[in-house]
Image (cartoon, grey):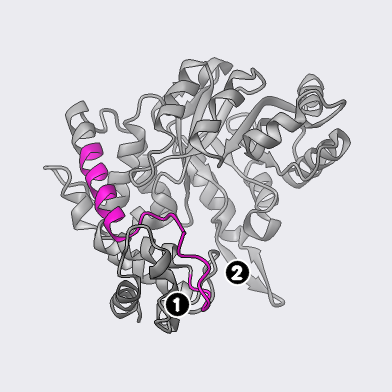
């Protein structure tokens, strides 16, 4: 396993982190629960292979992830850095502390190594500054008392809102989205590294999108990787500003494969990185020919989320991720998708969307093509 120094914290962290949001689940008495007979050995296998960073959150896996992580850490607590998050439901420092105490109890531990302000945004962050015993003051108090070792934040706000939060000096590490399909935080990652923060990226395989086979993506390198997922992970690990690629792993084979990849050095040459980035930018421009995602077409009277369905279609048409695109569209059809939308067959050809589209796209025709191509 490759290890790097995690910003100014001084600790050495593994290139691969275990994301505990997709642990094996099973049903019991009509409820979904974590299958600890599978999940605990799975995490311990990762620890034995050198992974020394595990990330959870209070709401993962039907609110059971933290408890399972706590079980897996028995006998490993002094070898593995633990990360979890505070959802910050209000600006009250006592409430913030109460949520921390609940996580400590769930995890059955006395301290958390990297405790994140979950899904931070610039506006909410500004609202905490200067508050008498708000979340920021509570976090520093918790650190002084040894309940947490390092104050961190995860980020989903616009890329341009990132730097002021880093510059505040409150935080020691970050968790942001970054992968071949979404490089919007690339500059921010480099900035955080330059300011001495440890850098963890979530979604290195694009939330599963890059786990599906794609000859187009594999063809970006002369020496093809074994899988699209390997290509995606190597791309992230090749970025020298990133310490940890956080991967949600749900079976032993995934753990072994990812650990093997993270144990290599020299993932991609500079020329290969430049070539991949250039080709992915071309693909992004091509995707915009089908939809820019501006959402001026909304609302649709049939509750079709047009831009989302076109994004799914582009996974097939532009990136060759056909298997994943069909799976995602099937979730829409069955109402399982977390992004809600009627499927494209519900279009009644009223034309309201096309009159509002600044790109003058043939939306009704593209919806028909989407359903014809991706429906089971």
Rendered location of residue 359, percent (x, y) = 33, 58
Q: Is residue 91 above or below residue 303?
A: above
Q: Is residue 4 left or right of residue 375?
A: right
State yes or no: residue 290 in magenta: yes
Dot 1 crowding, Cα within 10 Å, few <14, some 14–19, many 20+: many
**Mark 1 sits on what residue?**
343
> Foreground: 291 or 309?
291
Residue 23 occupies quadrant? bottom right
Dot 2 crowding, Cα within 10 Å, few <14, some 14–19, many 20+: few
Q: Earlier in the sequence, mark 2 or mark 1?
A: 2
Rendered location of residue 312, percent (x, y) = 37, 64
Residue 53 occupies quadrant? top right
Q: Is residue 247 above or below residue 376?
A: above
Residue 174 occupies quadrant? top right
Quadrant where the N terminus is found in the figure: top left
Q: Is residue 215 above or below residue 136?
A: below
Give residue 129's mark. Answer: none
| Residue at mark 2 to residue at mark 1: CA–CA distance | 29 Å
Secondary element type, mark 2: strand
> Foreground: 21 or 154?
154
Magenta span of residues: 276-304
Q: Residue at x 31, y 65 (%)?
A: 361
Quadrant where the C terminus is found in the figure: bottom left
State yes or no: residue 337 in magenta: no
Whether residue 107 is visible here, answered yes or no, is: yes
Q: Residue at x 39, y 62 (%)?
A: 357
Judge depth for marks 2 and 1 and give the one in front.
1
Rendered location of residue 88, percent (x, y) = 75, 41
**Mark 2 sits on what residue?**
26
């Amino acid at each position: 396993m490759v290890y790097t120094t995690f910003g100014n914290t001084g600790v050495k962290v593994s290139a691969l982190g275990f994301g505990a949001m997709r642990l094996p689940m099973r049903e019991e008495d009509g409820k979904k629960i974590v299958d600890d007979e599978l999940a605990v050995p799975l995490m311990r296998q990762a620890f034995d292979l050198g992974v020394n960073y595990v990330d959870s959150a209070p709401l993962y896996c039907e609110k059971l992830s933290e408890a399972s992580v706590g079980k897996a850490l028995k006998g490993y607590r002094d070898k593995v850095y633990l990360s979890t998050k505070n959802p910050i439901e209000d600006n009250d420092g006592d409430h913030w502390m109460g949520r921390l105490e609940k996580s400590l109890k769930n995890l059955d531990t006395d301290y958390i190594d990297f405790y994140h302000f979950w899904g931070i945004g610039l506006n909410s962050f500004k609202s905490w500054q200067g508050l008498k015993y708000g979340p920021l003051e509570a976090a520093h108090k918790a650190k002084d008392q040894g309940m947490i070792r390092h104050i961190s934040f995860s980020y989903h706000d616009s890329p341009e809102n990132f730097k002021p939060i880093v510059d505040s000096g409150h935080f020691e590490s970050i968790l942001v989205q970054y992968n071949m399909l979404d490089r919007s935080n690339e500059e921010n990652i480099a900035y955080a590294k330059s300011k001495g923060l440890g850098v963890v990226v979530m979604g290195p395989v694009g939330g599963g999108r890059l786990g599906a086979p794609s000859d187009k993506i594999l063809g970006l390198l002369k020496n093809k990787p074994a899988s699209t997922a390997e290509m995606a992970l190597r791309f992230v690990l090749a970025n020298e500003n990133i310490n940890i690629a956080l991967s949600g792993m749900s079976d032993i084979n995934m753990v072994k494969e990812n650990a093997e990849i993270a144990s290599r050095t020299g993932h991609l040459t500079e020329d290969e990185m430049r070539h991949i980035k250039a080709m992915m930018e071309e693909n992004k421009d091509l995707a915009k020919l089908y939809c820019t995602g501006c959402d001026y077409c909304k609302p649709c009277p049939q509750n079709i989320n047009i831009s989302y369905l076109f994004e799914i279609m582009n996974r097939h048409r532009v990136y060759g991720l056909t298997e994943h695109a069909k799976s995602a569209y099937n979730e829409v059809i069955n109402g399982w998708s977390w992004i809600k939308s009627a499927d494209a067959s519900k279009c009644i050809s009223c034309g309201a969307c096309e009159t509002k589209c600044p790109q003058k796209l043939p939306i009704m025709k593209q919806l028909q093509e989407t359903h014809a191509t991706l429906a089971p």
